[in-house]
Amino acid sequence: MAKRVGILTGGGDCPGLNAVIRAVVRKADALGWESLGIMEGWRGLLENNVEPLDLIRVSGILYRGGTILRTSRTNPLKRPDGLTRLRENIELHGMDALIAVGGDDTMSVADRLFQQGVSVVGVPKTIDNDLYGTDYCFGFDTAVNIATEAIDRLHTTAEAHNRVMVIEVMGRDSGWIAVASGMAGGADVILIPERPVDIEQVCSLIRRRSERGKDFSIVVVAEGARLPSGEEGGGGMQIHQSRIVDEFGHVQLGGVSNFLAREIEARTGFETRVVVLGHIQRGGSPTAFDRILATRFGVAAMTLAHQGDFGKMVALRGNQIVAVPLAEAAKSPRPVDPELYETAAVFFG
């Protein structure tokens, strides 16, 4: 009887997930394994929502955004019998291996399962690119390209109207998208969660541009940027769109750009507008880089499963695909490289 591998996608969606699924199924078939798709992440495994995956099912999905397996932010660790139910359903379907595709939350559950004897391999997925153990996650390049195109377009309208444009991009705890898209798009100020926002310094940079005859500015801010003490929601706090907390303890962020825009306009006198890119960054077809990286990850993950090398997450180090312990990937978010930010800061103002 052929061995079986289950695959699930957890957390937020991003371009490239389907490329991973396709790669796992193709590699599994080449190795003589059967593939099972677990619907809606950990929720599907809890609720026994499992479907067969074959070559026909994954044909033509390489370029598609989202995930054919759908996803959820379900946390099995919040249920008293969560891990037990996961193990029972893995056994019920005769899975010899489980490939979990997700970020630090998904990897933390995968690591707990591995500690209890389940044969798990992880694939790193976070659009914020802040997962420890890997230099890049698929989906990040696509998000940066989308944000950069938006910044390019906003430059022309900002200049035409002598406006300050504040563009809010994703980045809960790390500002990788903000820094990368801001550098590529020629932003005049980039604000990230790793460095508390100094609003007066931002305004000073905008005034300095005006003195040089530049009466428009582009400010890129990560949604998780932290306000300093004394400001609304200050003390290093993030601005929340709602107080609802998901099962992994995350609140819905959003609104920092609106606060900044009000402050900039009040302090400088420049007309200021806000653009929140939001879920646009998650949607659409993945870039060539993300398609290739996701494919490499999927093939490598299935190879680890076939070799019986469990408790690992595939990762990109330099240009090589390596395996790192799941526990390493489940650590706190990986911050932006300070040297990269300092390079971006040369062009501020």
Image: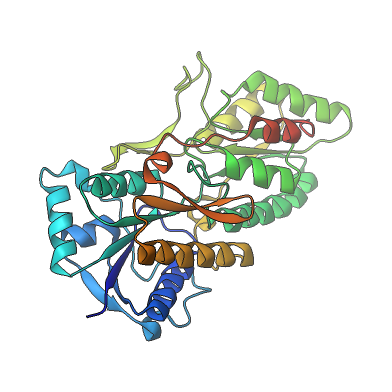
Color style of the picture:
rainbow
In the picture as drawn, the residue positioned furthest to the right comes out as 212
- In the drawing, does residue 77 fall left or right of residue 211? left
In the picture as drawn, the residue positioned furthest to the top comes out as 230
For the question of whether residue 167 can be seen, the reply is: no
Measured as percent of width and height from the top left, residue 115 is found at 25, 44
Q: Is residue 129 above or below residue 17?
A: above
Measured as percent of width and height from the top left, residue 146 is found at 62, 57
Depth check: 12 or 53 in front?
53
Q: Is residue 157 above or below residue 291?
A: above
Identity of the residue drawn at 71% across and 27% down = 269
Measured as percent of width and height from the top left, residue 98 is found at 30, 61
Depth check: 96 or 173 in front?
96
Identity of the residue drawn at 77% across and 40% down = 162
In the picture as drawn, the residue positioned furthest to the front comes out as 307
Could you tell me which quadrant the N terminus lies in?
Answer: bottom left
Tell me which corner region of the image, top left, top right, bottom left or bottom right, holds residue 301: bottom left
Tell me which corner region of the image, top left, top right, bottom left or bottom right, holds residue 87: bottom left
